[in-house]
Image (cartoon, rainbow, N blue to C red):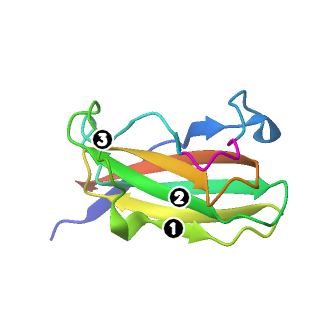
Amino acid sequence: MATIRKNIAAAAVLHETADYGGSAAVLAADGAYDYTSDVDLETLGQEGTHVLVEFHGNNAQDDFIVDVFGSLDATTYDTEPIPQYHRTVKNKGKWQAISLIVKDLLHFRIGVKGFSTNTIFQYQITHQAWNLSNA
């Protein structure tokens, strides 16, 4: 009987604002999405990835929205987020984190935004992909 092994890649930072040690701009209070770069699960045959989104707002007025946008070719992305990955997180005005498990997409990117225009967010998005193999 074959044993299935999960091979986990090193964690990679997708987006990081100054409060988290990065140089990316904060999420502006404009209600528009900020997007990560492409996450490529196709090239290395990866099945999925654990995405960690850490954030905090300068106040507790607006919720923080996290969405996943899929792509077949890393060029053209969905115009609407994939519903099963949509998260609206109640902003408590302090550090918070959520995890998403994204599977069975060739390429995707994460979009984050505030619910309205009252809150500026600092955030970091990392992911750690895996594939399966026979041990």
At 47% across and 48% down in the image, what residue appears? 110
* Crowdedness near tag 3: few (<14), some (14–19) or many (≥20) residues, C-alpha within 10 Å: some
- Mark 2 neighbour class, 10 Å CA radius: few under 14, some 14 to 19, many 20 or more: many
Residue 25 spot, x, y in % from top left:
70, 32
Q: Secondary structure at mark 1?
A: strand
Q: Residues at badges 2 and 3 in contact (C-beta under 8 Å)? A: no
The quadrant of the rendering that contains the N terminus is bottom left
* Circle 3 residue: 77
Whichever of callouts 1 and 3 sits on the residue coming sooner in the sequence is 3
Label 1 – label 3 distance at C-alpha: 19 Å
Tag 1: amino acid: Arg
Q: Which residue is mark 1?
A: 87
Q: Say whether residue 102 is left or right of residue 97.
A: left
Q: Residue at left 24%, top 66%?
A: 3
| Cα–Cα span, label 2 and label 1 | 5 Å
Q: Are marks 1 and 3 in contact (CB under 8 Å)?
A: no
Magenta-colored stretch includes residue 87: no
State the residue in front, 135 or 34: 34
**At 58% across and 38% down in the image, what residue appears?**
13
Mark carried by residue 106:
none
| Contact between labelled residues 1 and 2, with CB atoms less than 8 Å apart | yes
- Toward which corner of the image does residue 43 lie, by quadrant? top left
Location of residue 104 with respect to 12 vertically, above or below: below
Mark 1: few/some/many CA within 10 Å (<14, 14-19, 20+): some
Nearer the observer, 25 or 118: 118
> Residue at point 43% right, 63% down?
101
Q: Secondary structure at mark 3?
A: loop
Q: Earlier in the sequence, mark 2 or mark 1?
A: 2
Q: Which residue is mark 2?
A: 66
Residues in magenta? 27-32
